[in-house]
Image: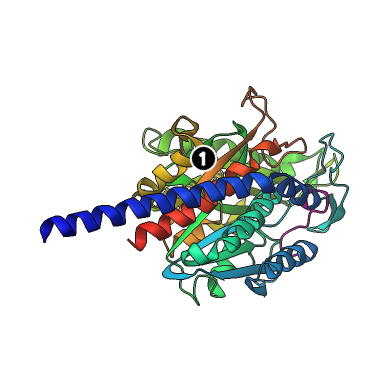
Amino acid sequence: MKISLILSLCVFSLQAVAQKNTLRTQVNSKADALQQQVVTWRRDFHEHPELGNHELRTSAIIAKHLQSLGIEVTTGIATTGVVGILKGGHPGPVVALRADMDGLPVIERTPVPFASKVKTTYNGQEVGVMHACGHDSHMAILMAVAQVLSSMKADLHGTVKFIFQPAEEGVEPGQKGGAEEMVKEGVLENPKVDVVFGLHINSQTEVGKITYRPGGTMAGVNDMQIIVKGRSAHGAYPWSSVDPIVTSAQIINNLQTIVSRNINVTENPAVVTIGAIKGGNRSNIIPESVEMLGTLRSFTPADEKMLIARVTEIATKTADAMGATATVKIPYSNHYPVTYNDPKLTQKMLPSLQQTAGAANVLFRPPVTGAEDFSFYQEKVPGLFIFLGGMPKGGDPLKAPSHHTPDFYIDESGFSLGVKALCNLTIDYMNAKTK
């Protein structure tokens, strides 16, 4: 009896392994066949970028594609979001896969025939629009993943929820959007999501490679506004003023001591940056006020709390010492939590990534001080966010144009690896949960 049971278990195990290998072979074949289609989709999105909460053309193309695959589609979530639900042939967990859709207010400079020439108005100013962070790649890859998995749905042990999200880069002050709004509008419910996977193309990681990090992988972020008010005067008589420009300069210098003197940099990095300063309109007039805008980056709740407290303390007390006043708003318009890869989930799915890309091509990475609103999904369910190489082979990471710049460039030859990675993560997670 025991021998018979052991043999039965062995047969079942061998069948499971054989099925897994068969599905992986199918995924690889289908992903390779779709490589050129992914490039075509990506170039179309790249040539026609749209800012956050304005992705009307983009979302319509995505919804039409998902519907053509027989996927149940809902549109208009968090303004322009699209969600597709694919029910597999067998019961099992619900796996969410997410791609972001928005471009950035950047004038493109890359010498490619599909470069964006789109112009629009952002925050009251005429700007260019460019997919300068790779969201066009993310959408095209996830559209292909939907095509591959829908063709294999009879073999899927669970449900896939495809989330195409607007406004990852944030919205103009006064608006709402992005992953936080998607979550509030129930994107992780009906059916309830068990796990969420996402990827981000990286222009400074060589094509063909995948990088990952368990725990805090991208920083939590708060933006901030500091308004310094003094007393205006003629530029020729500065002693009649309380100069908010000089006061702001002192504040900016003093803020630099937070990271150098208050953060234990051996444990976690942090960033305090002032990115904009606005005050005055003439060379011989000392203005009444100055506005500063900036960003805070941290990897733990304790560090986040300390950064906010120190910025507020330094700004207000420095202004007071100069005879001025400072008003600090943190966050000013947006806040993203830390992008936190569940350590157990990361460890569990690492073999899937290694089998997909080859163990030598799956690399542990240091924390990234950039931020991602994928973190809002990870606050609710376990999640894994990985990075896909997009730098040409042999390139220098220090010279490759970085994200959010006019020269941002992606080698498209690695797209099929992104398709394979998301498909295999989905299938392997489902199969592991239903054994």
Disc 1 target residue: 368
Q: Residues within 10 Å of mark 1 (few under 14, many from 20)?
A: some
Q: Nearer the viewer, residue 46 or 356?
A: 356
Query: Which amino acid, by three-letter code, is at mark 1?
Result: Val
Q: Is residue 230 visible?
A: no
- Residue stretch in magenta: 45-54
- Going 66% across and 57% down the picture, which residue do you hit? 143
Query: Is residue 272 depicted above or below 302 in this figure?
Result: above
Quadrant (top left, top right, bottom left, bottom right) of the N terminus: bottom left
Query: Is residue 161 depicted above or below 208 in this figure?
Result: below
Quadrant (top left, top right, bottom left, bottom right) of the C terminus: bottom left
Query: Is residue 173 depicted above or below 222 in this figure?
Result: below
Q: Nearer the viewer, residue 412 or 220?
A: 412
User: Main SS type for the magenta part?
Assistant: loop
Give the tally of numbered discs: 1
Q: Is residue 408 visible?
A: yes
